[in-house]
Amino acid sequence: MNRILNFSLFEREIEKSSDWDSDYDSLESNPLWIELKNRGFVNEPTPIMAKNKTPLIKNPKSPWFYPAGVVFQRSGYIRDKGASSGFVRNDLTELNDMLSYLIERYDKDLKKMGDSLSSIEGSDLGLDHIKLISSGTKAKWYYDKSTGRINVDGRFDLYIKNKDDKEKLYQIKFGKIKTDFSVIFEDAAFEAGETGSFSYAPQYVGLDFRLYGARLQNLEGLGKVERTISLRGENEYDGLSLEAISDCKELIIGDFFTIPYDIEHCLLVLENGCVEKSYTPNGHRYAKSNYSEPEEDNIARSIILTVPIMKNESILKYFDENPMSIVIFENPSERLKGLKNFIFSKLGYTDRDIEAIKRQKNRIL
């Protein structure tokens, strides 16, 4: 139902609208707008926005600061033109209040960006790179001259929509990421059949590392990840190598497997192919996928064989230090028989050891 105003409120609405129009028409002589112009701001509304007296304000000299610009609406909203939803403020109905707020916000952001801007002096990074990096994080970031890499004191989440942004990303090298590192690529960023580059690989990720649609053949260059490594979306999984993984706690590769990164669960993939993670009242459960095709199972097995912990010396070390885990070889399939014979011959285990361990576990339970 439409709101019906009494006459006094109607007069006030008309007066407010008239004040807004007048303020907009005198924008060029407004002292607050002159302050913003001195900081590099411009007003570039679309034709329809100009007709409706709606400013679109941006700063080409400061591409990290709302790159798509901010919109002032007479309803009291200040909107980020580059955001699909949400607002910056929604309680300022006077144009002067909006201009004052933008000055204050910009000066605060400029102070925060000071170290970042000074750090890139002498590097190969330009304004386009600054814009791309800043669009991926609200945290403080800086260029480390000793490593030639970008460090981020927080999380980094980047969305690559086109080829230009993809090429800019390929020119950036990341160092230490305090929490999460995530990059999502749209298909439009690639040519048909193109293989992605991983030149931007971070050296350290404090929590989770996620790449979606990156089209990688390997993770060469990736440093230590403290928690999860996740590779999903459009990718050349057939022939994917994970030899470069140094360490993580959980490994997620497409729809092929989601497993804790340890030898027992890698052997589960080798045995079954695609493995799913499910949730039960007793915790997580990892089991053969009910939806995978034989070809997908074979791809999962080939991928898991490339991880460093599946090398013979790592497997021997694991079962030497964890003898109770040999129960996994109680009734091995043809795929695991050869591995069982290798381990047992090297470490001196027998099937009697498996039975003894089972009895011991039963007593504990």
Image (tube, helix red, strand yellow):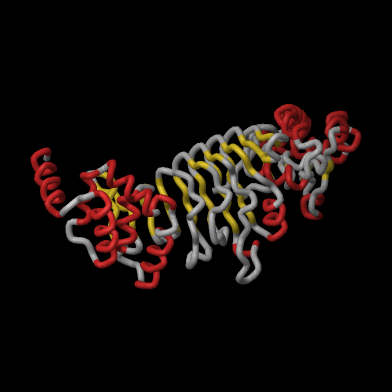
Q: Is residue 346 above or below residue 118?
A: below
Residue at 43% in and 54% down: 307
Number of on-image labels: 0
Q: Is residue 75 visible?
A: no
Residue at the spot 85% in from the left edge and 30% down from the top edge: 35
59 or 125: nearer the viewer: 125
Residue 12 falls in image quadrant:
top right
- Apparent side of residue 307 relative to residue 25 in the rendered image (left or right): left
The image quadrant of residue 295 is bottom left
Task: Give left or right: position of 252 versus 118.
Answer: left
Residue at 66 percent of width and 45 percent of height: 173
Residue 362 falls in which quadrant of the image? top left
Residue at the image position 26 percent from the left and 43 percent from the top: 322
Looking at the image, the residue that sits furthest to the right is 29
The answer to whether residue 38 is seen in the rendering is yes
The one nearer the camera, 319 or 114, is 319
210 relative to 297 in the view: left or right: right
Find residue 61 and report its horizontal and vertical position in percent.
Answer: 82, 40
- Report x, y in % for residue 7: 67, 36
| Foreground residue among 160 and 216 | 216
Q: Nearer the viewer, residue 336 or 192?
A: 336
Where does the image place residue 23, in percent across and percent down from the top left? 83, 36
Image quadrant for the C terminus? top left
Image location of residue 234, percent across then percent down: 53, 63
Rendered view: 198 above or below 334 = above
